[in-house]
Every structure is written in structure tokens, then in C-alpha cells.
Amino acid sequence: MAIAFDTLGYAKRLRDVGVEQKLAEAHAEAARDFIMAELVTKSDLTAALDAVTLRLTVRLGSMLFVAVSALAVLTKLN
């Protein structure tokens, strides 16, 4: 999901405090290209959390299976 970034408003705010227009526009474009590209959205975090939860659930299930199997083998040996 893309995040909207108002480059025009950002550049205008810079111009309002005295930054020349060309520099303000370049700064706004750089912020959009480099800073905004690195932001994480809520849906990104949810997807990552879902993936981690699934991996942990599978790992826990596997460990539980191994433990129960080892316990079954040990009780048969005795």
C-alpha cells in the first residue's frame, strides 16, 4: 500500500520559510523518493506478523510432536 506524500505542499512550506523554489522542489522529491519509500504501513506490519506467527506455530507444533514421540519411545523401553 502506497502512502500519499504531498510534495507540492512540502515544497510550498519550504518556500514559505525562505528556501528557493528549485531547492524546495528538489528536497520534496528527494524526501518522496528516499524517505517515503522506507516507511512501513500497518498492512506491511500485519503481514509480517502473520508470517512470523505461522512460523512459530509450526515450530512449536514440531517440537511438541518430537517431545511426545520421544516420551512414547522412552515409555516403551521401560
Image (cartoon, rainbow, N blue to C red):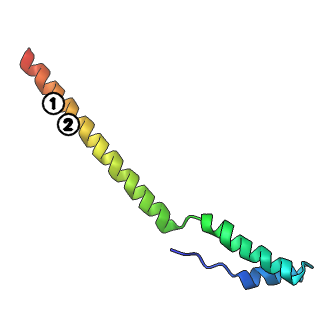
Which residue is located at x 85 percent, y 81 percent? 22
Which residue is located at x 92 percent, y 79 percent? 18
Rendered position, 33 above or below 66:
below
Few, some or many residues within 10 Å of mark 2 (<14, 14–19, 20+): few
Please state the horizontal and vertical placement of residue 24, each as a whole percent of the image. 83, 78
Residue 16 falls in which quadrant of the image? bottom right
Few, some or many residues within 10 Å of mark 1 (<14, 14–19, 20+): few
Q: Is residue 55 left or right of residue 76?
A: right
Q: Which residue is identified by label 1?
A: 69
Rendered position, 48 above or below 18:
above
Please state the horizontal and vertical placement of residue 30, each as a whole percent of the image. 73, 71
Residue 61 falls in which quadrant of the image? top left
Please state the horizontal and vertical placement of residue 78, each as a whole percent of the image. 8, 14
Image mark for residue 1? none
Kindly check if marks 1 and 2 are in contact, taking CB atoms under 8 A apart as contact. Answer: yes
Q: Nearer the viewer, residue 7 or 72?
A: 7
Q: Is residue 25 left or right of residue 76?
A: right
**Amino acid at circle 1:** Ser
**Amino acid at circle 2:** Phe
Extreme right residue here? 18
Q: Which residue is identified by label 2?
A: 65
Residue 47 falls in which quadrant of the image? bottom left
Secondary structure at badge 1 equals: helix
Which residue is located at x 31 percent, y 47 percent? 57
Q: How many marks?
A: 2
Secondary structure at badge 2 equals: helix
Extreme top residue here? 78
Marks 1 and 2 sit apart, C-alpha to C-alpha, by: 6 Å
Please state the horizontal and vertical placement of residue 5, each as a whole percent of the image. 66, 78
